[in-house]
Amino acid sequence: MDTTFAPIALDASNPQPPQGETLSGLDIAQLQKYVVVTRRKVRAGQYLYRNGQPFRALHLVHAGFLKTCELSEDGREQVTGFRMRGDLLGVESIGLAMHICDAVALDDAEIWELPYPPVLDALKHVPELQVRLATALAEEIRRDRVWMLAIGTLPAEQRVAAFLLDIAGRLARLGFSARHFILRMGRADIASFLALKHETVSRALSHLERLNYIEVLRREVKLLDIPRLRACVGTPCTTP
C-alpha cells in the first residue's frame, strides 16, 4: 500500500528531544551529554533563520519540509534547495559569522538545534556526529554539483522529471513511497529551483502526464512508469 504523509502534530510542552530517540544514526541522549540539543517548532511559512543573521547553530530536520533560498541580484527569491527529515541545515555557513541564505518551513516542522561552535567539542566524543557532519558537507557539495550540471545541460521537461525522481528517491530512503507522494513545495518554488518559469513547470508536468509517466492532482503525484521517467532524463521525452 502506498504511503502518504501529513504534517506532524507538534508537542509544544517539551523543548527537549525525547530520551533514547535517534535520527540519522545519532543517539540524541548520547549527544546531550556533551552539547545542549534544543527542539524547535517552526510553523509553515516561518523562517528557521534569515540571511545575515548570526550563525550560531546547525539544524537537524526531525520532521517536516523546508526550503533554502537566496536573493538574486535583481531582488528575486532564488530557491537553492529543499530539506527534509535527516537533513542538516546551516552547513553552508560554517566558517562564517552570518547565515548566507534563508531557511523557510514549507509545512509544520520540528528541528533539533545543535549550538555552534559547542557542537564541535561533541565531535570528539560522538563519532556518529562527526560522520553525519562530514556526510552533510559532502552531500551539499554533490547536490550543488548535480543540480548545477542538470540546470546547465537539461531541457526544461527533463529537469522536471529529474526533480520528481530526486524527491522520490529521498522519500524512499526515509521509508515513504517512491511512487505516490505529496509535494510540499508549490510549482513556483520548483520553477525557481530549476531556473524555469512557473508556466514551463506546469506544461512539463502536463506533458509527462499525457505520456502516462506520472499522474498529478494539484500537489499529489504518482509515478506510473519510473523506468521511462528515468529514460526521459537521459533522452528527450517522446511526444505521444
Image (cartoon, grey):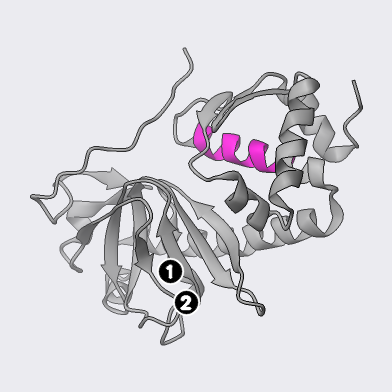
Three-letter amino acid code of the residue under disc 2: Ser
Disc 2 and disc 1 in contact, CB within 8 angstroms: yes
Q: Residues within 10 Å of mark 2 (few under 14, many from 20)?
A: some
- Residue 42 is a magenta residue: no
User: Which SS does the magenta portion mostly show?
Assistant: helix
**Front one among 210 and 41:** 210
Label 1: element kind: loop
The residue closer to the viewer here, 168 or 208, is 208
**Image disc number at residue 124:** none
Residue 52 left/right relative to 23: right
Residue in the image at 44% along x and 47% along y: 84
**Which of the 4 quarters of the picture holds residue 120?**
bottom left
Circle on res. 90? 1
Residue found at the far top of this picture: 1
Highlighted range, magenta: 161-172
Name which residue lies at 70% across and 39% down.
202
Determine if residue 185 is in view. yes
Above or below: residue 8 compared with residue 109: above
